[in-house]
């Protein structure tokens, strides 16, 4: 099984578990939540550039691939809230402590990411080629960048 399929299977399994268990008990250990969110970030980090390459004309536009990649981003954007519970600010993480003190701002980024990825998916489904992706892709990329600038160590 390829690394991507293993990762996707792990995220799917974790998502099913996260949806079936109360928020306070989603992970056996805080470091499991950190691993989970890193897996989500990895998937997003592999998916967003493919859409960007299409939007920028660096690779040929393929509507089916644009839709599949946008669907992945919509799905993964829903996974973040479960991965930032109490105690997940320690260990092997690049998350800044402000995530847990400015929760309203962090939630706005989560909400904005959900809305931006939905727009990107709608643009991909509507057709219109690479040009139709440019604006929505830029919105997703800016939301990611803003959250990373405010909440990630580098």
Image: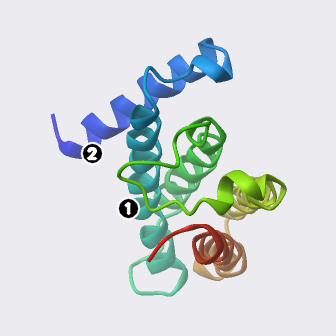
Residue 125 falls left or right of residue 59: right
Q: Which residue is mark 1?
A: 46
Q: Which residue is mark 2?
A: 4
Q: Where residue 33 sits in the image (x, y, percent)?
A: 47, 36
Asked if labels 1 and 2 touch by Cβ distance under 8 angstroms, the answer is: yes
- Vertical relation: 53 (above or below) 45: below
Q: How is the image coloured?
A: rainbow
Q: Where residue 81 sits in the image (x, y, percent)?
A: 66, 41
Foreground residue, 114 or 91?
Answer: 91
Foreground residue, 24 or 123?
Answer: 24
Q: Residue at the spot x=43%, y=26% of the render?
A: 29
Q: Secondary structure at mark 2?
A: helix
Q: Where residue 44 sits in the image (x, y, percent)?
A: 47, 57
Query: Which numbered disc flags the more N-terminal residue, 2 or 1?
Result: 2
Q: Quadrant of the N terminus?
A: top left
Foreground residue, 109 or 74?
Answer: 109
């Amino acid at each position: 099984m390829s690394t991507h399929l293993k990762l996707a299977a792990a995220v799917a399994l974790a998502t099913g578990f996260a949806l079936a268990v109360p928020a306070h008990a989603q992970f056996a250990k805080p470091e499991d939540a950190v691993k989970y969110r890193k897996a989500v970030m990895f998937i997003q980090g592999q998916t967003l550039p493919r859409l960007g390459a299409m939007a920028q004309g660096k690779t040929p536009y393929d509507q089916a691939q644009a839709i599949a990649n946008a669907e992945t981003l919509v799905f993964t954007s829903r996974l973040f809230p479960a991965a930032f519970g109490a105690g997940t600010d320690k260990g092997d993480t690049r998350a800044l402590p402000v995530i847990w003190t400015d929760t309203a701002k962090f939630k706005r980024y989560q909400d904005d990411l959900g809305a931006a990825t939905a727009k990107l998916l709608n643009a991909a489904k509507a057709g219109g080629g690479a040009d139709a992706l440019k604006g929505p892709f830029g919105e997703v990329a800016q939301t990611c960048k803003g959250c990373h600038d405010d909440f990630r160590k580098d």
